Image (cartoon, rainbow, N blue to C red):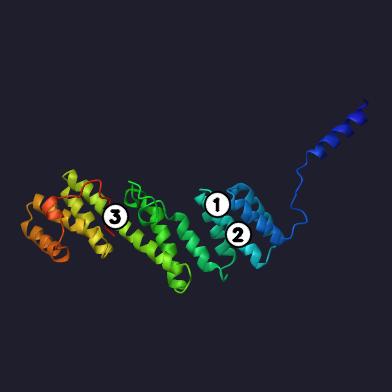
Amino acid sequence: MSLPLIGAALALSGCSSTPVDNTLGWSPNKLYSEARDERDSGNFDKAVELYEKLEGRAAGTPLAQQAQLDKAYTHYKSGEPAQAQAAIDRFMRLHPTSPAMDYALYLKGLVSFNDNLGLFGSLARQDLSERDQKAAKESFESFKDLVNRFPDSRYSADARIRMTYIVNSLAQYEVHVARYYHSRGAHVAAINRAQSALTDYADAPALEEALYILVMSYDALGMDQLRDDARRVMETNYPQSTFLTQGFRKASDPWWKLW
């Protein structure tokens, strides 16, 4: 075969390997429908690809905005929180007055919320109070923004429940640390963390234990007046408490089973 013919053959070979876009000619509605089907079937990468095509072809339309949010949700469902957050932040930046802003805020909070814990999951042994608190605080702020800006949104009721859960968890985190300090004999540090919980998280279930840690830590330091004051507050607010008679709860009793 002559050189020109070889070159032509290689060129044809290269053309035959060019990916064919099977979505050419699809309407935006068909693209959206196919993307949802792929996502619902667990084909997350394919769904994201279709949502991105839809964003481009339907640019400037409400359907393109919906594609951006659905792409973020797909990343969330596929266990890619960083990509989900990036997609949500981009949507919020590009469409600050979108009618779907309440959903964007809800999804932003949901991405950071660990829904395999407490009321929302399988009651795993490790609870949110033993994990990094940064994500919990970010989730709370997103839900709070949603509730404040869109109190009547269909997503606000669930957001309020999750906010309560997060607050209780953050309170328990302080108590978790206070208990650790107390067990190590660092009673001043234990008192500081228990007081932080009492000051910052009113009505959280963990406050019963926070008061008990104060009683025990003040007693260990020989601060009888403060010990008695803490005990009096505890007996007034938790008259049926078993802490004073049985001590710390067993490990089999996770905090979130109390509420």
**In this view, the mark in front (1 or 3):** 3
Question: Quarter of the image containing the N terminus?
Answer: top right
Q: Which mark is residue 135?
A: none
Which kind of residue does numbered mark 1 sit on? Answer: His
Indicate left or right for 189 with 146 as reference.
left
CA–CA distance in space, label 1 to label 2: 11 Å
Q: Is residue 122 above or below residue 96?
A: above
Horizontal and vertical percent for residue 170?
Answer: 32, 57
Answer with mark 1 or mark 3, whichever residue precedes in sequence: 1
CA–CA distance in space, label 2 to label 3: 38 Å
Tell me if I can see residue 151 in this picture: yes
Q: Which mark is residue 75?
A: 1
Asked if labels 3 and 2 touch by Cβ distance under 8 angstroms, the answer is no
Kindly state the secondary structure of the residue where label 3 is placed.
helix
Horizontal and vertical percent for residue 144?
Answer: 41, 66
> What residue is rendered at 78% in x and 38% in y?
17
Which kind of residue does numbered mark 3 sit on? Answer: Lys
Q: Which residue is mark 3?
A: 257
Indicate left or right for 204 with 182 as reference.
right
Horizontal and vertical percent for residue 217?
Answer: 14, 52
Question: Quarter of the image containing the C terminus?
Answer: bottom left
* Residue nearest the viewer, comparing 143 with 165: 165
Answer with mark 2 or mark 3, whichever residue precedes in sequence: 2
* Neighbour tally class for label 2: few under 14, some 14-19, many 20 plus, Cα within 10 Å: many
> What residue is rendered at 41% in x and 63% in y?
141
* Neighbour tally class for label 3: few under 14, some 14-19, many 20 plus, Cα within 10 Å: few
Horizontal and vertical percent for residue 127?
Answer: 33, 50
How many callouts does the rendering have? 3
Q: Which residue is mark 2?
A: 68
